[in-house]
Image: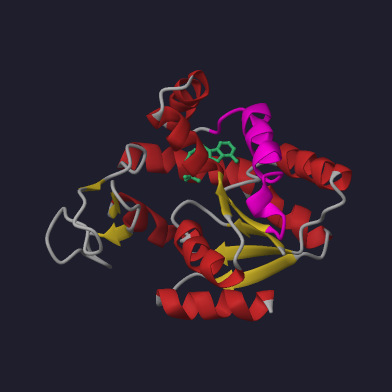
Amino acid sequence: MNIILLGPPGAGKGTQAKRLIDQYHIPQVSTGDMLREALKEGTPLGLEAKKYMDQGALVPDSVVIGLVKERIQKSDAKNGYMLDGFPRTVAQAQALDGILGDLSQKIDHVVSVEVPNSELMGRLTGRRTCRQCGAGFHVIFDPPKAEGKCDKCGGELYQRSDDNETTVKSRLDTYEAQTKPLIDYYEDQGKLRHIDGVGKMDDILTRIKAVLG
Ligand code: AMP
């Protein structure tokens, strides 16, 4: 099953993807994670991407399309994958359709995780991640037992550099201008499934599983 998780920054796509992949046995393909990994390794691609990420802007389409094209052809993706944070522009969606056509594949479901704008800023600026195991926390909604320390592995928690108020504002504007049109794009293809992204994590997961079948 090939799935796209669509939604604004802070909708909880990554969190839900991590839980869904365990149950569907398909990998999460997060372009944001791939770009952060490239930056951590100090590759030219990662350093170039950082300029855009720090401003809350999108990395050029050609860069992320290339990353995804390569990633979905790896052996662990042969039974499907969950795209998280890609596509983010209509040009990326069109390129993806072309790549999938060449590979004789298709997207089965596009899950639109919907959260009111008023909630997103607080969700993002309070977000903390474990440096060691990648577990996610929130300083108010899901605080760790000991401040700054991961409950699962004891690793150090950090705040993503683009989760500050100024960059979050740009990311939300970028979403409205460039990514939201994808709702109509996939609605027209009859693939869009609307999910209420507000509430308990478990309830949202249940809603997503119900539409995926
Ligand atoms: P995310 O982890 O999905 O919130 O992405 C973090 C940042 O990585 C975004 O603000 C963009 O700068 C960049 N990025 C991630 N995915 C894409 C994409 N599909 N197209 C362009 N830029 C992306």
Q: Which of the two residues, 210 or 123, is positioned nearer the viewer here?
A: 210
Q: Which of the two residues, 46 or 58, is positioned nearer the viewer here?
A: 46
Residue 79 lies in the magenta stretch: yes
User: Which residue in the rendered view is the most extreme toward the left?
Assistant: 146
At horizontal 65% and vertical 56% (from top left) the residue drawn is 81
Count the labels in the image: 0
Q: How is the image coloured?
A: secondary structure
Left or right, 87 with respect to 55, comes to: right
Left or right, 38 with respect to 111, comes to: left
Q: Position of residue 187 (x, y in %)?
A: 77, 61
At horizontal 67% and vertical 49% (from top left) the residue drawn is 75
Can residue 153 be seen by looking at this rendering?
yes
At horizontal 68% and vertical 32% (from top left) the residue drawn is 66
Image: 36 above or below 176: above
Can residue 55 be seen by looking at this rendering?
no
User: Which residue in the rendered view is the most extreme toward the top?
Assistant: 44
Q: Quadrant of the N terminus?
A: bottom right
Q: Position of residue 213 (x, y in %)?
A: 69, 79
Q: Position of residue 179 (x, y in %)?
A: 62, 46
User: Which residue in the rendered view is the most extreme toward the front?
Assistant: 75
Task: Read off the magenta span.
Answer: 58-80
Residue 46 lies in the magenta stretch: no
> Dominant secondary structure of the magenta stretch?
helix
Q: Which of the two residues, 161 or 101, is positioned nearer the viewer here?
A: 101
Image: 50 above or below 150: above
Left or right, 170 with respect to 113, comes to: left
Q: Position of residue 194 (x, y in %)?
A: 64, 70
